[in-house]
Image (tube, helix red, strand yellow):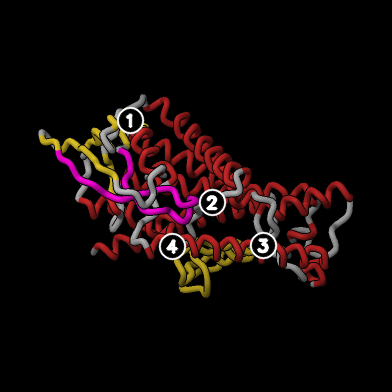
């Protein structure tokens, strides 16, 4: 049952986010009277489907994501005489009519994340990461769990230094990789002493980590404020990601990026934690998918957008050969990023750690 819940969590958490992204492309293409040949939930061969008008609607065998296939969008189709004479084919459209179609996918992700955040905030309250030095979560197999720390333990001292906030505790742990720390904690009405040794985190330049996360408190807000608060969360996580990547680039540090394995771990963990954590994580993933697709990398929506804007500036289509070369570079970049993220996931697995959501990037 636990494994089934994890699988369903991954399908709902990641698959639906990609499906919503493709739904954005589909709705705008239909609205602009472009010919949509296929719209599917899932990837790969069709499992079941039906034809409605000119579009084939179907469920595919791999329930992760979705696909929108527009007539005339694939490279080489511009040489098809039938499509060349079809005013509804994608490549026949002027560049400024293709722009809304490619932007619709990321835009739908932002709308989806805003609605999810608004629902969580309206139903459970606005999530606020507590600054109290109280443990809210433990990562399996990490030093804190091995040493015997428990959820709700309050950190009182580290190496005889009084601890008054979560950030203070986090900084002490980060600065002592591989060094034994003496902890004084309060558990219920008891005060206990124990020690642990932070392990170097290879994904964050070797800073010390012990595998604890702070408590998240849900502060209730008026229902009328939920949608606005949801939009603020979408904006925050979008800006947070950009700033994080910028800081890593400026300081020549390796970013802590999760690949499919890491994302599946986090989603599966959130599925067991409760609906509020699970839905909030879906919202964060939706923001990430929307932002990533806006990067000007060929093959992504942002890459297509760059091609169309260049076409508009030059007042002529780009040469197919140039687009093919750019797509080859884009594919190489995406594969390199996937390999890098998967390597990060494997490094965590070797340490038996589950990646924490960005909100809980703590020691």
Residues at marks 2 and 3, CA–CA distance in whole angstroms: 36 Å
Q: Disc 4 marks which residue?
A: 347
SS at circle 1 = loop
Residue 265 pos. (x, y %): 38, 59
- Which badge, 1 or 3, comes first in the chain's sequence? 3
Q: Disc 1 marks which residue?
A: 165
Q: Disc 3 marks which residue?
A: 70
Q: Nearer the viewer, mark 1 or mark 3?
A: 1
Residues at marks 3 and 4, CA–CA distance in whole angstroms: 40 Å
Position of the C terminus by quadrant:
top left
Residues at marks 2 and 4, CA–CA distance in whole angstroms: 13 Å
- Which badge, 2 or 3, comes first in the chain's sequence? 3
Q: Disc 2 marks which residue?
A: 255
Residue in view at x 85 percent, y 63 percent: 319
Residue in view at x 75 percent, y 51 percent: 306
- Which badge, 3 or 4, comes first in the chain's sequence? 3
Q: In the drawing, does residue 17 fall left or right of residue 270?
A: right
Q: Which residues are magenta?
A: 192-214
Residue closest to the eye, 247 or 119: 247
SS at circle 2 = loop
Residue 91 pos. (x, y %): 77, 60
Residue in view at x 68 percent, y 55 percent: 297
Q: In the drawing, does residue 214 fall left or right of residue 305?
A: left
SS at circle 4 = helix
Residues at marks 1 and 3, CA–CA distance in whole angstroms: 54 Å
Circle 2 crowding by C-alpha within 10 Å: few under 14, some 14–19, many from 20: some
């Amino acid at each position: 049952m636990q494994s089934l819940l994890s699988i369903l969590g991954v399908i709902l958490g990641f698959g639906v986010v990609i499906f919503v992204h493709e739904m954005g492309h589909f709705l705008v293409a239909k609205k602009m009277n472009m010919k949509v040949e296929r719209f599917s939930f899932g990837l790969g061969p069709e499992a079941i489907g039906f034809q409605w008008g000119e579009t084939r609607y179907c469920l595919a065998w791999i329930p992760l994501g979705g696909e929108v296939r527009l007539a005339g969008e694939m490279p080489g189709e511009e040489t098809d005489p039938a499509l060349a004479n079809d005013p509804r084919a994608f490549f026949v459209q002027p560049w400024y009519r293709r722009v809304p179609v490619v932007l619709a996918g990321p835009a739908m992700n932002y709308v989806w994340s805003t609605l999810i955040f608004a629902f969580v905030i309206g139903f459970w309250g606005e999530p606020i990461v507590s600054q109290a030095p109280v443990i809210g979560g433990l990562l399996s197999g990490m030093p804190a769990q091995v040493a015997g720390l428990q959820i709700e333990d309050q950190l009182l001292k580290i190496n005889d230094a009084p601890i008054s906030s979560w950030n203070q505790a986090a900084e002490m742990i980060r600065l002592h990789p591989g060094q034994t720390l003496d902890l004084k904690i309060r558990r219920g009405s008891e005060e206990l002493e124990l020690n642990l040794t932070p392990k170097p985190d290879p994904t964050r330049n070797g800073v010390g980590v012990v595998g604890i996360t702070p408590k998240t408190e849900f502060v209730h807000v008026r229902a009328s404020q939920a949608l606005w608060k949801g939009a603020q969360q979408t904006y925050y996580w979008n800006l947070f990601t950009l700033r994080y990547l910028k800081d890593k680039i400026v300081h020549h540090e390796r970013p802590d990026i999760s690949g499919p394995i890491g994302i599946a771990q986090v989603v599966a963990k959130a599925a067991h934690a409760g609906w509020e954590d699970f839905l909030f994580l879906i919202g964060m993933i939706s923001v990430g998918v929307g932002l990533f697709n806006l990067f000007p990398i060929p093959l992504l929506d942002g890459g297509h957008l760059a091609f169309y804007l260049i076409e508009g500036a030059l007042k002529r289509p780009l040469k197919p050969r140039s687009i093919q070369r750019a797509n080859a570079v884009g594919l190489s970049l995406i594969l390199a990023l996937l390999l890098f993220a998967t390597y990060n996931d494997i490094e965590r697995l070797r340490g038996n750690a589950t990646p924490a959501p960005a909100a809980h990037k703590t020691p």
